[in-house]
Amino acid sequence: MRRVISYFRPNLLKVILCLTIKISGVIAELFIPIILSYILDTVVETGTILDIVLYGLLMIVLSGLGFLGNCKANQIAAGVAKSVSVNLRKDLFTKIMSLSQSQVDSVTMPSLIARMSSDTYNIHQMCGMILRLGVRAPMLLIGGTVCTLFLDPMLTLIMVLILPLVVLVLYLTSKYGIPLYDKVQTKVDKMVLSIRENMTGIRVIKALSKEDYEKKRFNTVNKELMDYELKSSIVMSSLNPIINLILNFGLILVIVAGAYRVNNGIILPGKVLAFTTFFAMILNALIALNRMITIISKAYASSKRIDYIFDLGLDLRKETYNNTSKHYIEFRNVNFSYLGKVNNVSNISFKLEKGETLGIIGPTGSGKSTIINLLLRLYDVSSGAIYINGKDIRSYSYRKLKSLFGVSFQNDTLLADTIYNNVDFYRKLSKKEIKKALLVSQSLFVDNLELKEQTLLSAKGTNLSGGQRQRLILSRALAGNPKILILDDSSSALDYKTDLALRETIKNNYKNTTKIIIASRISSIMHAEKIIVLENGTITGIGTHKELLNNNELYKSIYNVQLGGDVHE
Ligand code: ADP
Ligand code: MG
């Protein structure tokens, strides 16, 4: 919570202004019933009509000022709350961007999204609430009680006897209502998940005609949500009528006791009237305090979740390593485990020279993408070392290391933006480079579009075919002439002829670029200078196409299945 409070600091003047207005407003409000009782008990008896009018005007001015001040203060409060949550969200976003892949894995992506959205929203709610009511409600409660004591201690006693009842009702509704709201929240999450799955999987659902099944599933979630929503509304909406009932009951008691005391000449009628006004004020303050406590406890839980992210240390920092390598890229005895239990890749060693091409082939789950993740330093090796240009990759700065690569990941997606921006990816590359990248990636289809590179894509590029998407993702990797080009399963959606043309153009246009190509088709990698066969996280074969055909069983069998000895060179 301390971190959240520190975000108020830049707005300190506004906070002080807001609270000052609030305090003055409460004082003015507390005066109104007192003036009222003074008019009724003293001015009406002894003063002139003019006096009554003047005091009446004073009441109007005070309540007018109180109203305007409150409006202004609430406006300031909204501004401060916005500024706090915007800045908090901005810093949290920056922090999340700096997390390492393994940190993201451990917190999980949906949880990060929730922390960015609903948790910062809870903080936003709390900030506004504290400024609006944090001072006002306690002041009304205490000030109101003190005033009633001065008016008539006997009547105050009656009120004090009623208050525990109110506190009990507030306690019970919170106790039963809040857990229901939590349930509503989880049901909302479930419904959003169901909607998301349905929207993204709509093609499969339609293709397998599972609409009815999905509809049923959605209806169940929807109904569950409705049930909880209804229950919590019933509990929470019973609060106001019950409080009103207690208020009226209390009022009757106060008026009866007051009338009795007025009759006996102990107290004047104006005071009883003022007393009832204070009574309502105090009850409202109690309700507001209760709401505030709910919102603060929610925000407190959220602030802990946000703090957890901020407190994550900087993983993968730049370190000094003295060992060097004579090769452009070298993996030396690399072992790595995602979860720290079993190694996902073991004893990986290979060398690659500048401009060479490395092909990697192996069954799903054999660790191909893991090797790329390690080379990009998305994760640090558990043991061993990786060198680029002779230096351990851990001694590169983050920027320097990333600037070496052009990457097309296995499950890369496109953004809802123009084709041009998707290829440029905000790197401010020249038009020529973009054109070249589109040409090399065989994205001729772009020229046939009405708006060419300025064509707008839908999110994830769903208005393109799988092959077209893959070509644009390839262009993105190629644009900017990277020193190291990594293609992870990037030609699977291309037909053989296009795949062949792609390899030819990459070879001719990116001579100085070192290429690492992961493919499931032997034809995509058979011309590479070096090919690695990966099985169960270890290298079971390394060499040229010819060598592997002679000495690697898996390679030979893949080759026989895919090309059946009929090689198109
Ligand atoms: P490939 O690319 O060859 O299909 P991967 O390198 O993606 O295989 O995965 C190798 C192994 O590591 C698999 O067993 C997979 O389940 C595991 N793995 C991959 N990514 C993660 C991750 N983020 N967390 C835990 N395990 C992972
Ligand atoms: Mg993979």
Image (cartoon, rainbow, N blue to C red):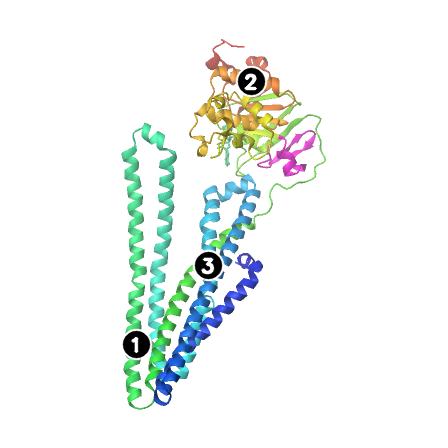
Q: Which residue is mark 1?
A: 251
Amino acid under label 1?
Leu
Relative to 34, does residue 430 appear above or below in the rendering?
Answer: above
The residue that label 3 is drawn on is 126
Q: Report which quarter residue 236 is drawn in.
A: bottom left
Q: Residue furthest front?
A: 50
Per the rendered image, the range of residues in magenta is 376-404
Q: Position of residue 350 (x, y in %)?
A: 63, 25
Task: Indicate whether residue 381 is drawn in magenta.
Answer: yes
Q: Position of residue 129 (x, y in %)?
A: 45, 61
Q: Amino acid at mark 2?
A: Arg
Quick one: SS at disc 1? helix
Task: For marks 3 and 1, give the CA distance.
Answer: 33 Å
Q: Is residue 535 magenta?
A: no
Q: Is residue 450 left or right of residue 194?
A: right
**In whole angstroms, how far apart are the C-alphas of marks 2 and 3?**
58 Å
Examine the image and state in which quarter residue 395 appears.
top right
Q: What's the mark number on residue 503?
A: 2
